[in-house]
Amino acid sequence: MLALTACGSTEPRDPLTDAAEGSLIIGVKYDQPGLGLRNPNKAMTGFDIDVARYIANYLGVQPDQITWKEAPSAQRETLIKNGEVDFIVGTYSINESRLKAVDFAGPYYTAGQSFLVRADDDRISDEHPLQDGMRLCSVSGSTSAVNAQKYFPGVQLQQFDSYSSCVEALARGKVDALTTDDIILAGYAAQYPGEFKVVGTPITTEEYGVGLAKGMDAARSKINDAIEQMIADGSWERALQGALGSSGFPLPDPPQVNRY
Ligand code: GLU
């Protein structure tokens, strides 16, 4: 019976309890260059990874005591509620409907929803938004897919499990555009130089929060403290610059940590 709870409990985790015991399980994206990327040698890189490591360190947990867990957009609330992660740092927008299921610390970054198209495609631009019938790709369980349906009901929306699958479909001409947050798109554009371009004035404001189980108020407050310190001591700017500075994407100023 010893192994009963070995893989995935069903009780939500308290990050402070786990940190006191010396380890954390952190949910992140594995396929978003510049944000959360699991490299072929398994090293984790990206701005979200740096934010996660900073928070862990603030809670007394060293990098080698972090267990990373992939947190696809549609599974984030479930991973948190089932106690499969302590918290998630994964381009996770704070919004009303998610706040019914989970809590958020932050925000630690403000993005906006935009479009990625092939570099030689001039049909979609800031002046010419999507045309009816175009094939648009986004990810299930994301705010991007919900907004795409709301703002562009005439387009054919295809929902995949990950943005990297959308990028592949875009490269092969299976879809005309990919829509999600500008910073995510900038990461892909930088990964494949000359292949894609980010277009369109952002249609939303996406405040990225650190998702954790409801009611873990002491942990949420400490994570807010960690984010504030990361911004104040310059680590936030260094991390963003290091992860996406060479992409050409204009890096924004840090947000006000509103302590949701
Ligand atoms: N920030 C948006 C969201 O949380 C899109 C990015 C993502 O799916 O991770 O849904």
Image (tube, grey):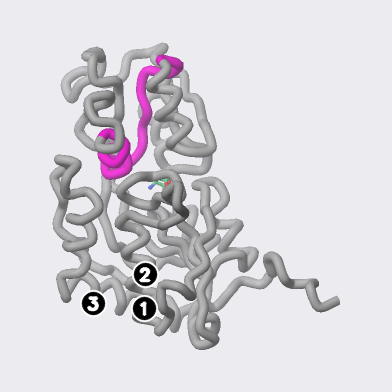
Q: Quadrant of the C terminus?
A: bottom left
What separation in Å lies between label 3 and label 2 (alpha carbons)? 13 Å
Q: Is residue 147 left or right of residue 225?
A: right
Residue at 27%, 57% (x, y): give it: 109
Query: Type of residue at label 1?
Result: Asn
Q: Is residue 11 left or right of residue 71?
A: right
Residue 229 numbered tag: 3
**Residue behind mark 1:** 57
For numbered disc 1, what is the local secondary structure? helix
Residue lying furthest bottom:
20
User: Relative to the observer, which residue lies in front, 259 or 34?
Assistant: 34
Residue 53 numbered tag: 2
For numbered disc 3, what is the local secondary structure? helix
On whether ligand 1 comes within 8 Å of the CB at mark 3, the answer is no
Q: Pointer 2: residues within 10 angstroms few (<14), some, or many (20+)?
A: some
Magenta residues, start to end: 173-189
